[in-house]
Amino acid sequence: MTNSYPWAGRLIAAYIAEQASMEMEELPAARMIEGVGIEGDRYATGRGTYSYKPHEDRQCTLIEMETLDALRRDHGLTLEPHESRRNLTTQGVPLNHLVGRHFRVGEVVLFGGRLNVPCKYLDDLLGRPLFNPLLNRSGLNCRIIKGGTIRPGDVIEPV
Amino acid sequence: MKLLMAVEVVARRQVTPRVVQLTLRPAKRAAFPAFRGGAHTILVLPDGKRRLYSLTSDPDRPELWQVAVLREAAGQGGSAWLHEAAAIGTRLLASHPQQGFALAPEAARHILLAGGIGITPFLSMLPELRRAGADYEVHFCARSEAEAPFLPELRAALGDRLRVWIAQRLDLARLLACPAPGTHAYCCGPARMVQGFAEATAHWPAGTTHVEHFAGIPRAEAQQGEAFEVEIASSGAILPVPADRSLLEVLRAAGHGVDAACEYGACGSCVVQVEGGEPLHRDVCLSPAARRRSMTACVSRGRGRLRLAL
Ligand code: FES
């Protein structure tokens, strides 16, 4: 596929949660397991909220740092990266345009499955009205096409 | 559900024959999130059971939390498990602090009323009161000295700010007869005591009385309260809920399949939609918005008649 609008971003942080409702833990390095998920994460261990309906597009979830900044700027709402319940926080990556595309995060290759849709569950968990502000920019659910280890600072770019 | 943290039991102390104190440390973070005195946490046991416990440790010591667990005679095993199996080194999950009950910062004087294990939410308030140099008094009711948790520590720390009522009735109506301006009163104890407190303070200015219904109160008592009735929207049936039964029990007995997990107002599994009437919410899990249209069947009750969308 041609890359008509070049972009390059980077990985800000990587998180996992052992099980549903648990605080996310920041990782210095995340081991991405091809076709499965992130080592230690709830969707790799089958202990997530949606684990009863596993879907390959939910192997790992991404959200833009720009979205978190916009929530603060436009709505006065704080959503820290570790609170977002998404695994990878990105910067400079047009996540909404990566549905159906392959892209690289460091040595790993992801495939943009579906846009993430916000969930009321996050409002309850954090006690903040995040549902509406997150509509249409709730991040991207991805498949892990080529595994490997990624670290904050890694370059994210089209394949 | 609320956000959970991994915690580890790092100390245990038998406080009375039926109360064990557990000291918890965060397993994956340096310190616990901040809370104010009176907050509670929801502990999630390995079998998934959820139990609410007041934080009894000083809010200024975020590196550890303490809770005091009353062993319930007729409980469903949650407190028994914490008594018997939660050894040092045991991993549990604990929710972020839930702050329903707290000191009113604007109060000129605080009257704290505790019954038995109901002393626990006050234990984390006392350091705040001391540091603020506040004017306060504590009334502690218990069946016997041996069954009054933390009594020696309280005596030592509070001196004559503490009044102990052992096997002797505290006359709430008299104590609370004349609300002085700026005085706030707080109560945590068995259902009977909370009821007496509500009656004795009915004439107090709005917002000056505070009740903690749950933390540490035996489940059977949490599920009792005022009698009310419900109308089932689909059938028009009227079901009375007597004072000694929960709405959940009554609905199930009438053949309505309502889910439940904690039966303690903590998890939200038993939520039913309310179409009319005035629910008395006693859960600790619903948002204000959710409370406008629904209620927990396990612990919440109603005034008069409620109409349920069942
Ligand atoms: S069963 Fe958990 S809130 Fe009612």
Image (cartoon, coloured by chain):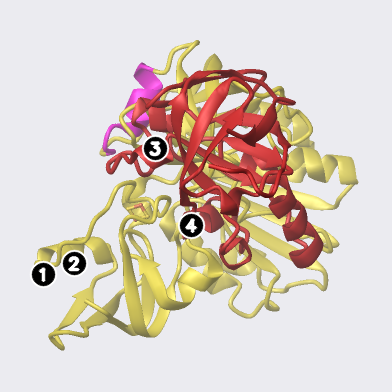
Chain colours: A red, B yellow
The residue depicted at 70 percent of the width and 69 percent of the height is: B208
- In the rendered image, residue B239 lying in the magenta stretch gets the answer no
**Residue B150 position within the rendered picture, expressed as x and y whole percent measured from the top left:** 60, 29
Q: Is mark 1 within 8 Å of ligand 1?
A: no
Q: CA distance from mark 4 to mark 2?
A: 38 Å
Residue designated by label 4:
A117
Q: Is mark 4 within 8 Å of ligand 1?
A: no
**Chain at numbered mark 3:** A
> Do the residues bearing badges 4 and 1 touch, measured as CB atoms within 8 Å?
no
Query: Most prominent secondary structure in the magenta stretch?
Result: helix
Q: Is residue B210 above or below residue A122?
A: below
Q: Quadrant of residue B299?
A: bottom left
Q: Quadrant of the C terminus of chain B?
A: bottom left
In the rendering, which numbered label is found on residue B250?
2
Disc 4 vs disc 3: which is toward the camera? 4
Q: Are marks 1 and 3 on the same chain?
A: no
In the rendering, which numbered label is found on residue B304?
none
**Chain at numbered mark 4:** A
- Point out the stretch of residues depicted in magenta: B75-85
> Do the residues bearing badges 1 and 3 touch, measured as CB atoms within 8 Å?
no
**Chain at numbered mark 1:** B
Query: Is B211 situated left or right of A153 in this image?
Result: left
**Chain at numbered mark 2:** B
